[in-house]
Amino acid sequence: MSTLAADQPKSHKTQTPAGKAVEDNTAKEQQDTAAQSAPADSLDLDMAEVPDSTMMPVESEGFHKTLKVKYIEGNAGFMSFVALVLVLGLAFCIERIIYLTLSEINAKKLMTDLEPLIMKGDIEGAKTICRNTRGPVASICYQGLMRIDESMDDVERSITSYGSVQAANLEKGCSWITLFIAMAPSLGFLGTVIGMVMSFEQIQMAGDISPTIVAAGMKVALITTIFGLIAALIMQVFYNYILSKIEHITSQMEESAITLLDIIMKYKLTR
């Protein structure tokens, strides 16, 4: 009994350090595991915060930015002349389009309104309608009514003469538009020639024909030519539209003049 009692404390003392050593080893392994996992977690967080350059959207250059770059590359001096010609040409085109648009009326309706008044002898009422109606068609009709008491030859002569004046007013400013249409590509070709001269001067200074030296001058030459042709094409489209409107209004004037002469002839026969 005394031997067992003496052995039990000894066995308890030998087990406690072993258990404590196991616990210490387990705690040390947990700390090592935590120390190894901590940098990985922080690295993952850092990688999450750093944006991936391959995933970022690439911003494309806008048309105005590209146009600005090409404008500068094409020698700003000559490009400014081409731009000025384009602006002035478009200004004349817009002015003509507005004028012609305001000059267009329903000519058939006007003649339909004038005929009963003229046949009834209400010449003043017919003149009032012409005065209150815009456009060259109404102006021609008013001039014819002003001489309705004269001979038909005088009435016809008055309508024809005033029609020529109104046709000239319709075409006012078109000569400037044609000038600008011719100037735009001419300035572009002038830039081309100057760009070629620049290329040969650079070749002469370098003493060698290098593709880089030649390409610089040729690039300036071609860009100025392209912009000059584009400006001329834009103004040409507007100019053709203006011509079509002038032809339409002129045909209205001629048709209305013939109709008015017929109405005046009927009026004179009924008197």
Image: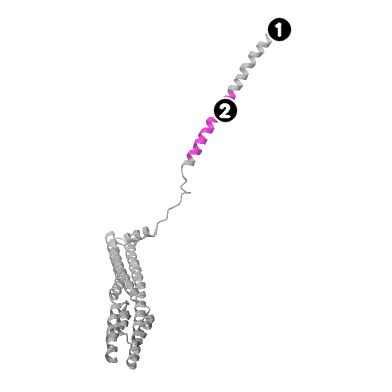
Q: Is residue 89 at all visible to an observer of this figure?
A: yes
Q: Which residue is mark 1?
A: 3
Closest to the observer: 75 or 105? 105
| Secondary structure of residue under mark 1 | helix
Location of residue 173 in the rendering, given as x and y in whole percent from the top left corner: 28, 74
Above or below for 126 versus 182: below
**Percent position of residue 105, x then y:** 36, 77
Amino acid type, mark 2: Gln
Q: Of residues 29 and 257, which is closer to you in this image?
A: 257
The numbered dot on residue 30 is 2
Residues shaded magenta: 25-46
Residue visible at 30% across and 78% down in the picture = 131
Toward the right, the furthest residue is 1
Tell me if mark 2 has few (under 14), some (14-19) or many (20+) residues whose alpha carbon lies within 10 angstroms of its own. few
Q: Main secondary structure of the magenta part?
A: helix
The residue drawn where x is 32% and y is 65% is 224
Tell me the element at label 2: helix
Label annotation for residue 78: none
